[in-house]
Amino acid sequence: MTNKEFSLFRKLLYSEYGIYFDDSKKGILKIKVDKLLRMNNMNSYRDYYELLKNPIEKQHLIDFLNIMTVNKTHFFREQNHFDFIKENLSEILQKNPMILKEKKIRVWSSASSTGEEAYSIAILLNEIMPKDIEIKILGTDISQRALKIAIKGRYSPIIKKQIPKYYLHKYFVKIGEEYIVKSNLKKMVQFRGFNLKDKFPFKNGIDIIFCRNVMIYFDEIFKEELINKFYKITPKGGLLFIGHSETIRNLKHKYKYIKPTIYIR
Ligand SMILES: C[S@@+](CC[C@H](N)C(=O)[O-])C[C@H]1O[C@@H](n2cnc3c(N)ncnc32)[C@H](O)[C@@H]1O
């Protein structure tokens, strides 16, 4: 892959999805594009790039995003975020009074990958929220492969190590070796495709936004743009959680800092 070819793919990924491959990641990008060339029986980077610019079938773009994204996640990842919500629930409800007034809490897992984050939030909120509050969780991602797994809600026995036994039995059915999310949990969570680069389509505010372990793939310019888009849909008292290896402290935004990786409007 020549430097020119590398910069074509880099530009495409950045302008369409905000994902930025700096020069040090040329090797990783090449491995991924090589795999896509093999999948499409092609041998020219240029021809494949042209195909992505004018895809004959939607599937070409779907395959591209499935391969380009990193979907690593697990249940109750970065546990202290879940602890924070549990320990500060009355303050959260007091600072954002619309939740009790509307009897509804809206949460967005904005890079939900295979669904573990969204289902973890659902478990937590179902355990701690007053029973008359409707829990609405939206999980979105650009990887169709990841979304399919999230929608199915079927997970391998690995999750036994990630979820306390009591919750595992309460919220999952074991069929064969697999653990399947029960319908009482599933009905709180909706998944759909959404690119964080796009204009947000929400009519209502989102009380809690999880944007974790995706901004590491973005550059400072897009991160700042994104955080400001989040702010606009956050009601007063609403929260933003970011990943532990991420920071927004050097960006211009109006969120108030609570503690590392936790912000409030
Ligand atoms: C490492 S996973 C993070 C999953 C989960 N939030 C967590 O912290 O465990 C990153 C996810 O971000 C998604 N992603 C990358 N760029 C995106 C974009 N522009 N819009 C929406 N999702 C994106 C990827 O498809 C991937 O599933």
Image: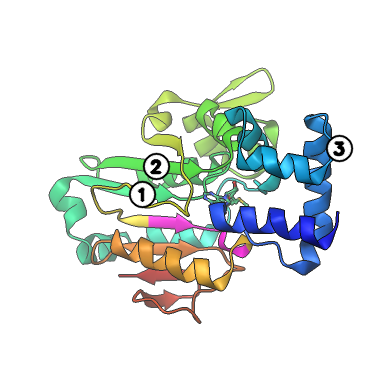
Circle 3 residue? 43
Q: CA distance from mark 3 to mark 1?
A: 44 Å
Q: Residue at x 71, y 44 (%)?
A: 49
Over which residues does the magenta segment extend?
209-216
Nearer to me, 57 or 17: 57
Q: Position of residue 156 (x, y in %)?
A: 67, 31
* Classed neighbour count for the residue bearing mark 3: other residues with Cα under 10 Å, few (<14), some (14–19), many (≥20): few
The correct choice, above or below, for 224 with respect to 34 in the image is below
Circle 1 residue? 107
The answer to whether the residue labelled 2 contacts the one labelled 1, judged by CB atoms less than 8 Å apart, is yes
* Classed neighbour count for the residue bearing mark 1: other residues with Cα under 10 Å, few (<14), some (14–19), many (≥20): many
Q: Position of residue 227 (x, y in %)?
A: 42, 66
Q: Residue furthest bottom?
A: 250
Circle 2 residue? 138
Q: Quadrant of residue 254?
A: bottom left
Q: Is residue 36 visible?
A: yes
Q: Quadrant of residue 225?
A: bottom left
**Closer mark to the observer between disc 3 and disc 2:** 3
